[in-house]
Amino acid sequence: MPPNHPIRPTATALSPSTRLLMPLLAGLSLPMSVLPATPAQAQGYPEKAITIVVPTAAGGANDAMARVLGQGLSARLGKPVIVDNKAGANGAIASEFAARAAPDGYTLMFGYIATHGINPALQKLKYDPVADFEPIGMVAASPTVLVASNAVPASNAKELVQLIKAKPGTFSYASAGNGTAPHIAGELFKLSAGLDVVSVPYKGSAPAIVDTIAGNTQYMFPSLFTAYPQVKGGKLKALAIAGDKRSAVLPEVPTLAEQGIANVTLSQWYALFAPAKTPRAVIDRLNRELNSVLADKAVQKKFEDQGAEVETGTPEQLKTLVQKEVARWKGVVTAAKIKVE
């Protein structure tokens, strides 16, 4: 029998240049901040609470969705998820704050059509919706809906147009603020129908809806997610869907196009982002957990009961959407000559 020999690891040949560098590398201690992220490093994530920055005031669609997501992500990640509302400048304040946050996965951004689509067409920004963010994934979409105060004697968009034209300059519409999706929809409606109306901006959709219910403003274009509880409760009338098809939530309400009013199509979308240069391993973990939360039937029902449809996808798909939306709204705003004063 041949003698037993211990198994030794096979030596790997080193190049001359590597042998020269070995003494330097052996004494070099690199800070973790400059080392590339690896899946192993992401295994410890998260180690503390996560904040989701919401670019609107409490009470609106963004806030409601973010809180539902926060609860689901907290349960899956095992750490608290805090919602931080930073309203103002059509979401630009929150977006700039989130873009400048540390790219470590602990500050996230609940972006939507205004912050990552419409804003670049209307104002000079201190953030770039594409370059300054890492997309995580889509959350939901909700069509914009034309709603009116019960004091307005109109049951559809055509009748509202007739009323406004009969008394030009006496009607006003509410919006969530200049440059917001409800404002853009209101201006497109005004231009398409040839109306003489006054735009009344508010600091968010919630106060705008309150004044529309009270009759202080006659109509507005909120997301269906925001308006549905008031429509369902009989406090507002839904006159038209500003989308390319009817909503499954309000199937009896026709689109504006069906009523002869063209070029007013606006669906509000919502998504989750992280600051640029957040490690890919962290982005992938958040995308998986986000999609798992959105796959929950209870979460889907919460969204659907409010007029929103859950949408999921990859970071790459979200990046493509943002690029397309930025280009689209620059074209629309320029063609319609919409300005924010």
Image (spheres, rainbow, N blue to C red):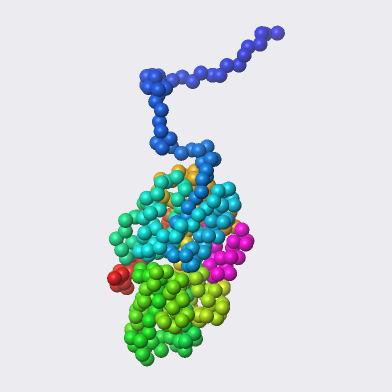
Residue furthest right in the image: 1
User: Residue drawn 43% across and 37% down?
Assistant: 36
User: Residue drawn 31% across and 58% down?
Assistant: 125
Count of numbered labels shown in the rendering:
0
User: Residue drawn 55% across and 48% down?
Assistant: 79
Q: Nearer the viewer, residue 199 or 243?
A: 199
Among the 4 quarters of the image, the one containing residue 290: bottom right
Q: Nearer the viewer, residue 189 or 298?
A: 298
Asked if residue 184 can be seen in this view, the reply is: no
Figure quadrant of the N terminus:
top right
Task: Give the extent of the magenta segment.
Answer: 296-312
Asked if residue 341 can be seen in this view, the reply is: yes
Residue furthest bottom in the image: 166
Left or right: residue 154 compared with residue 167: right
Q: Residue 306 magenta-drawn?
A: yes
User: Residue drawn 59% across and 61% down?
Assistant: 299
Among the 4 quarters of the image, the one containing residue 219: bottom left
In the rendered view, would you say 20 is above or below 103? Answer: above
In the rendered view, would you say 205 is above or below 6? Answer: below
Locate residue 139, reporting x and y percent: 51, 59
Figure quadrant of the C terminus:
bottom left
Locate residue 7, reporting x and y percent: 60, 16
Among the 4 quarters of the image, the one containing residue 163: bottom left
Q: Residue 198 magenta-drawn?
A: no
Locate residue 75, reporting x and y percent: 59, 52
Locate residue 296, reporting x and y percent: 61, 58
Q: Nearer the viewer, residue 336 or 34?
A: 34
